Image (cartoon, helix red, strand yellow):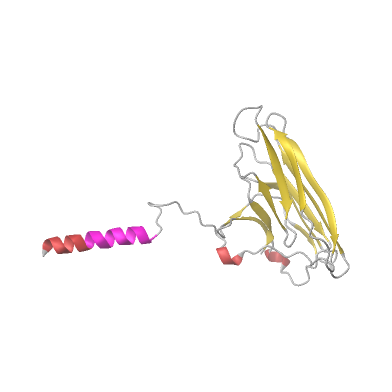
């Protein structure tokens, strides 16, 4: 009978340990923002049946030199407004882990439906690249601007806060801007609440 209790206790301990996420089994990668509470802000719908246009730029960045990639683009919204986006990412020399002659073809893609952007290839950095983005022509009338943040959001819904200068918002002009965002890794980032 004593063996049965020991086996039962061991079984329950193993079952509990496998079913619960604990810091002993896996790291706690959660963020103070819950998965369902952060959504990227939507861009205004495009006018009519306008052609789908991807806002994309790419450039080879050499580790010893660094460099900058920029996008300056616009489209006509359904309400007749012109939506503009200005984005740039600057890589300091030595941004990548590895030799100074190492280089990567970096791609920056701005989403066509939300105020988000993605970067590739996926990687972490030795020295953080700095990202700046400004949207013009947005309708921010139904957005609680006090809650807007610029965040990383993973494919699994995980979120991560970033270091950046205060977000600038002008609801009457429809502008939304953030500067000096330090990107620790490449993935998907954007404005949301």
The span picked out in magenta is: 9-20
In which image quadrant can residue 96 be found? top right
Q: Give 54 or 38, whichever is nearer the viewer.
A: 54
Magenta stretch, main secondary structure, is helix
Outermost residue toward the left in this view:
1
The image shows residue 180 at horizontal and vertical percentages of: 72, 47
The image shows residue 157 at horizontal and vertical percentages of: 57, 60
- Which corner quadrant holds the C terminus? bottom right
In which image quadrant can residue 142 be found? bottom right
Residue at left 78%, top 71%?
Answer: 141
The reply to whether the magenta stretch includes residue 16 is yes
Residue at left 79%, top 66%?
Answer: 44
- Which corner quadrant holds the N terminus? bottom left
Q: Give 123 or 168, whichever is nearer the viewer.
A: 123
* Residue 60, placed above or below residue 18: above
In which image quadrant can residue 7 be found? bottom left
Residue at left 76%, top 39%?
Answer: 68
The image shows residue 95 at horizontal and vertical percentages of: 65, 35
Left or right, 48 with respect to 109, comes to right
Residue at left 86%, top 70%?
Answer: 79
The image shows residue 123 at horizontal and vertical percentages of: 60, 42
The reply to whether the magenta stretch includes residue 160 is no
Q: How many labels were placed on the picture?
A: 0
Outermost residue toward the bottom in this view:
142
């Amino acid at each position: 009978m004593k063996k049965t209790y020991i086996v039962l206790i061991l079984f329950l301990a193993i079952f509990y340990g496998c079913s619960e996420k604990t810091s002993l089994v896996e790291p706690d990668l959660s963020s103070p923002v819950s998965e369902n509470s952060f959504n990227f802000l939507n861009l205004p719908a495009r006018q009519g049946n306008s052609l789908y246009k991807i806002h994309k730029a790419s450039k080879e960045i050499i580790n010893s030199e660094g460099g900058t990639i920029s996008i300056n683009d616009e489209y006509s919204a359904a309400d007749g407004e012109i939506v503009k986006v200005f984005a740039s990412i600057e890589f300091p020399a030595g941004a990548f882990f590895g030799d100074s002659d190492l280089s990567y073809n970096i791609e920056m893609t701005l989403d066509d439906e939300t105020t988000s952007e993605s970067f590739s290839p996926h990687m972490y950095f030795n020295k953080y690249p700095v990202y700046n983005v400004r949207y013009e022509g947005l309708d921010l009338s139904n957005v609680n601007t006090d809650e807007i943040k610029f965040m990383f959001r993973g494919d699994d819904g995980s979120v991560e806060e970033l270091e950046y200068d205060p977000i600038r918002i002008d609801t009457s002009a429809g502008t939304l801007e953030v500067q000096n965002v330090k990107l620790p890794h490449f993935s998907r980032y954007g404005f949301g609440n």
